[in-house]
Every structure is written in structure tokens, then in C-alpha cells.
Amino acid sequence: MSRLRLILGDQLNLNHSWFKETNSSVTYVMMEVKDETNYVLHHAQKIIATFAAMRFFANQLRSKDLEVIYLKINDKENRQNFYENIKSIVKKRNFSQLEYQNPDEYRLMTELQKLHSIEDIKAVPVDSEHFLIPKLYAKEFFSEKKHWRMEEFYRHMRKKFSILMEGEKPIGGKWNYDVDNRKRWDGSPSSTQDFRPSHNHEKIFLEINDENIEYFGESQATDFRWPISRDESIELLENFIEKDLLYFGDFQDALHDENWRLFHSFLSFSLNTKMLSPIEVIKKAEDAYKKKDLPLASTEGFIRQILGWREYIRGVYWANMPGYDQHNFFEHKNKLPEWYWTGKTDMRCLSQSISQSLTNAYAHHIQRLMVIGNFSLLAGINPKEVHQWYLGIYIDAYEWVELPNTLGMSQFADGGMLATKPYVSSASYINKMSNYCAKCKYNFKEKVGENACPFNSLYWNFFDRHQDKLSKNPRLGIVNSQLKKMNPTQKEQINKKAEFYLKNLNTL
Ligand SMILES: Cc1cc2nc3c(=O)[nH]c(=O)nc-3n(C[C@H](O)[C@H](O)[C@H](O)COP(=O)(O)OP(=O)(O)OC[C@H]3O[C@@H](n4cnc5c(N)ncnc54)[C@H](O)[C@@H]3O)c2cc1C
Ligand code: SF4
């Protein structure tokens, strides 16, 4: 039986059991297609890094004497979508079976189901062998429960995989050290250099330009700093564990305009393209804690992101698709301000976070959640627009992980399935965690003056205009009672200021 096996751009898992077989009647196929570059407007680095990693992977397979058909974006015979390309390959060569690894996104699942209709070939899906649990595991876990609490799921995962455990109990006696993960960073300890590899991707860049593929963000063709192979990803992981994990916990939520990485790992692209597996990352961190005596709060904080959040988020996605992207709990309709595409705003926290995202295709969690996401929600931006912007801009953005994080956690558009309350704050939180406010045109202390920080009036106005939906939320007791007690004249002034900002979002 001659088999054709399709490998997608985010399935670069060299340890998949496929590649352990010694079967000469197997041919692999990989393809760069416009259906994948164009379903949303992408950051240039995301397209280029993905193609570079795919090409490297194909060559690695060839070096193992495996046959690989590789369609580049500019190949003449490339029909630019999976179905047409596979149909044409099957017609030319006499394959009897087509195998593909289950994709992680609903959009792609629908696309690949079409392959089953190709005549004269049997299509067989297989596991991608990447995640720790099946995609509907979380749905089952929460089936009897009203709320999907990540913490409950995370504790279950710690026990199930015996990570940071002493028998049935968590090492150190506590499950979660989140309260120890909230320090501000003021220049010390100094974080390590950006140790990611450097690549010149000029050729791919020219090819995507020749094909008129649209993109945004920093498109400079040289010096791209994303790992494109498993070896580079392992180096990144080892460097992180060696030098930065020590401080990851303390400064996980910190923001600073002179240091956009701080102690974050940069591993999301390697993980989401499957060059690294989640369990190997978790085990390496756990091992380092045991052998090198790293702080438990840092190790636990890091492991929680992958063992807890990442698997949980995937569960939320698959339990709610299709349809999750349609939620708009607050019925927000505003358009994204134009400066989301340029970073040109006087709001320093946003100009820093967005400009950095445009330059590097990266922002760390708190920039995504408590700066850009926070503002988007307070400004009443349509969550679908916010979702598409996030899906395009970040190097690690795949719908299965981006959508629940953006639409659910950050925009509360699902009405609170993931988050117990909306993640919004006034300027005081941003000032506490960053040095952004000190150099900002706006005054973080003011609510209504000429240069009052927009976060302040928008924050109160958000709760005021959504009282019908939020007044009974038990986690918002303090905010709601402060709002009730607010002097009516002051409330009116705040609402007036907020309305002015809402009408002039493009000029902030
Ligand atoms: C609005 C919003 C959108 C996001 N979109 C994405 C996305 O498209 N793709 C993506 O991988 N992550 C997304 N995240 C989660 C998180 O911000 C990124 O995983 C992280 O910033 C990647 O950088 P890092 O590898 O340096 O992470 P680190 O801070 O070093 O964390 C380590 C790893 O933990 C995992 N992780 C951490 N938080 C989460 C989370 N909430 N959900 C899933 N995995 C998590 C990631 O794999 C990450 O690589 C989003 C978060 C928010 C608030
Ligand atoms: S003052 Fe307001 S807009 Fe300026 S950096 Fe601080 S929070 Fe952001």
C-alpha cells in the first residue's frame, strides 16, 4: 500500500511516531498555500518564520532518506489550497491511502474533511501526538460543573501527570504561587541578552512579495529571531531554564519600556508549531527545580502556564467550536483605532506594547491582557476585530489558543465562561506594574482633567454602562458599591470624559 502523508505548518514534530517507521512506501507532503497565509492579515514574521521552519523540517526528513513533496508558495503547480494540491498529487501518483494528523483549528478540520471526498483514495486522520490530553478531555472534566475554573483543572493535571507532587500533595504544600508572581521590575536583576538565533530570510521574503501576499508589521528580511528547528528550540529552552527561570515567577507580570522580554521564555512559537512538546518543557523545568534548587514559585508559575493554561485553553476551544468566535456579551461595536496598525498613540503603555508587537510579532502575557486587551474592552471594540488582530499579529497565534485567550479571557465576550470577571483596570494597575506612566503625556492620577489618563474614565464608564450585566457579579462587589456611592456630579464628569475619548479613539 502506498501512502501519502500530509504535514501541516504547525505539525513540525520530529518525534511523531510516523518518523520512527521504516516504510519505504510512504511519501510526505508539505505545502505553503495562500489559503493559510490569507485567512487573516498576518504579521510578516509569522509567515516567514513558519515557511522557514517548514522548509527546514522537510530537509530534515529528506536527510533521513524520507521522500518529501514540498510545494513552495511560488511553485507553478501550487494550487494554493490543500484540497486541490492533494487531488492533483493523487491523480499523478498512485497513492492508495492519504493520512493526516488531526489539525488543532476548527477551520482546518473542516478544510481537511474535504480530503475524504477525493476519489480513489482513503483518507485517514491520526493523532498529532503533541498535547497531554485529548481535545475533549476538559469538556468531560467540566461536564457537571457550572464554571470552568482553570485552577481546578490544573490541580487535576498536576496529579494526573505527577508534576511537582509529593505523593497526593503538592510539593511545598501549596498548589499555586500566583500571589508571589507580581513584582514590579526596575532594572534589576538584569535579564539576559536576547539569545534567540539569527536568520536571514530574505529569499522567503522576496517570494511572498512576488506572490502579492499581504502582511503587516516589521518585514525586515534579515535578522529574524525566531527558532526554526527543534535544535534551536531546545537551545532556547535550555538557555531559559539556565538563566531566566529563576526570575520568571517574580517578574511574570512586570512591564518595562526598556525591556520587552524580561524573563519570559519565547517558547510559544516552538511549542505551537510542535518543534517542542509540552511534556518535555514541563519535565525540564521540574528537573531544574529539583537539581538546581530553583525557587518553587518560579518553577510552579512557569509549569502552570503549560500544564494548566495551555491545555485548558485548548479544551475551552474545542468544547465551544463552532460558534465561539460569534460571542459578543457586551454587544461592543467600536472599530479598532487606526493606531493598532502603527503604534502611533500618545498613550505610552499602548504605543510601547503595540509598537513592540509590530516590530517583534511578540508581546508578553500582561501586555496582551492588561494593556492592549484591557484598553480594547474598555473602549468597546468589537471582540471579533480584536480577535482577528491578535490572530494576525503574534508569532504564536493559532486560533485554538488565541481565540479563547482573546475573546474569552481578555474581552469577556463569552459572558464569563473562562474569566470570573472582566480583566480591566484603571491606570493605577499599569502604573504599579510598569514604568510606562512616568513618561506618558497622560496623567495616570487624573480621571477628568484635560490630560487625564483615558483608562481612568473609561474604566468607570465601562462598569456604569454595563450595570445590567455586571451588577450581580459576586467578584465585582467592591467596584459596584464604589460606583453606587460615587457622587453624581463626579460620575457625570467621568462619563462625559469617557464619552469624549470613545468618540475620539483614533486621536488618543
Ligand atoms: C489576549 C491574549 C491572547 C493570547 N494569544 C495567544 C496566542 O495566540 N498563542 C499563544 O500561544 N498564547 C497566547 N496567549 C498566551 C500568552 O500570552 C502567550 O502564550 C505568551 O505570551 C507567549 O510568550 P512566551 O512563550 O514568552 O511565554 P511565557 O510567559 O514564557 O510562558 C510559557 C508558556 O506558557 C504557555 N502559556 C502561557 N500563558 C498561556 C495562556 N494563557 N494560554 C495558553 N498558553 C499559555 C505558552 O505556551 C508559553 O510559551 C494570549 C494571551 C492573551 C491574554
Ligand atoms: S498614563 Fe494611562 S495611557 Fe499613559 S501609560 Fe499610564 S496607563 Fe497608559
Image (cartoon, rainbow, N blue to C red):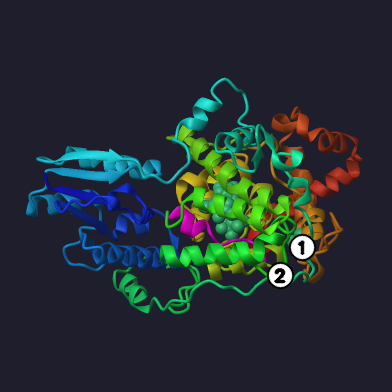
**Which image quarter: residue 323?**
top left
Residue 350 place in picture, x, y as percent: 67, 62
Quick check: is 267 in the magenta stretch? yes
- Residue 434 is tagged as 1
Q: Residue furthest top?
A: 144
Q: Residue at x 34, y 45 (%)?
A: 108
Up-down relation of residue 56 to residue 412 (above or below): below
In magenta, the rendered stretch is 262-273
Q: Is mark 1 within 8 Å of ligand 2?
A: yes
In the rendered image, the quadrant that contains the N terminus is: top left
Q: Residue at x 72, y 62 (%)?
A: 255
Up-down relation of residue 359 to residue 419 (above or below): below
Up-down relation of residue 200 to residue 104 (above or below): below
**Which image quarter: residue 146?**
top right
Residue type at tag 2: Asp
Residue 483 place in picture, x, y as percent: 85, 38
Between 27 and 220, which is closer to the camera in this rendering? 27
Residue 439 place in picture, x, y as percent: 79, 71
Q: Secondary structure at mark 1?
A: loop
Q: Residue at x 24, y 68 (%)?
A: 74
| Residue 455 horizontal side relative to residue 25, left or right | right
Residue underneath mark 2: 257
Q: Secondary structure at mark 2?
A: loop
Between 312 and 433, which is closer to the camera in this rendering? 312
